[in-house]
Amino acid sequence: MFEISQRFYFDAAHTLQREIEAQGSKRVHGHTYHAEVFLQGQPAGNGMVLDLGLVRQALQEVREQLDHHFLDEVPGLGPATLENLCLFIWCALKPGLPSLSAVTVARQSIGDQCTYRP
């Protein structure tokens, strides 16, 4: 079994209701998010699990929904947690990328990361 991945990033703002570090989170603030999607499979006759150009096309569609948006207003996202971002990206990509195996979203500047692997 092989696993390939492709990364993308997006900048977005949001608010978040939290029990700790609550004051800064309640205000509108932004992050640069780094996302990585993973796909598993066996190489086809062309020697590739999946053409990464096709993956990049799918990622661009998701990125356009998130990049430079106010995440509180993105339909279907819910509170803009790392967990919800992983699930949102997964749900957007899985129909067109059936070999999708995991999604990771990170805020590298502060060391936070989440991976969704059903």
Image (cartoon, rainbow, N blue to C red):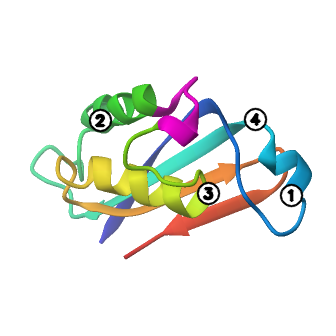
Dot 2: few (<14), some (14–19), or many (≥20) neighbours within 10 Å? some
Q: Amino acid at mark 4?
A: Val
Residue 58 lies, in percent from the top left, at 29, 35
Q: Which mark is residue 92?
A: none
Residue 67 on the magenta segment: yes
* Label ID, residue 58: 2
Q: Which mark lies nearer to you, 3 or 2? A: 3
Q: Which residue is mark 3?
A: 81
Badge 3 vs badge 1, beta-carbon distance below 8 Å: no
- Looking at the image, tell me whether mark 1 or mark 4 is earlier in sequence order: 1
Q: In terms of depth relative to the viewer, which is nearer, 62 or 49? A: 62
Please rate how many residues cluster around mark 4, counting C-alpha atoms within 10 Å: few if below 14, some from 14 to 19, many from 20: few
Residue type at mark 2: give it: Ala
Q: CA distance from mark 3 to mark 4?
A: 14 Å
Does residue 21 appear to the left or right of 39 in the view shown? Answer: right
Q: Are marks 3 and 2 in contact (CB under 8 Å)?
A: no
- Is 51 within the magenta? no
Quick one: label 3 or label 4, which is nearer the N terminus? Answer: 4
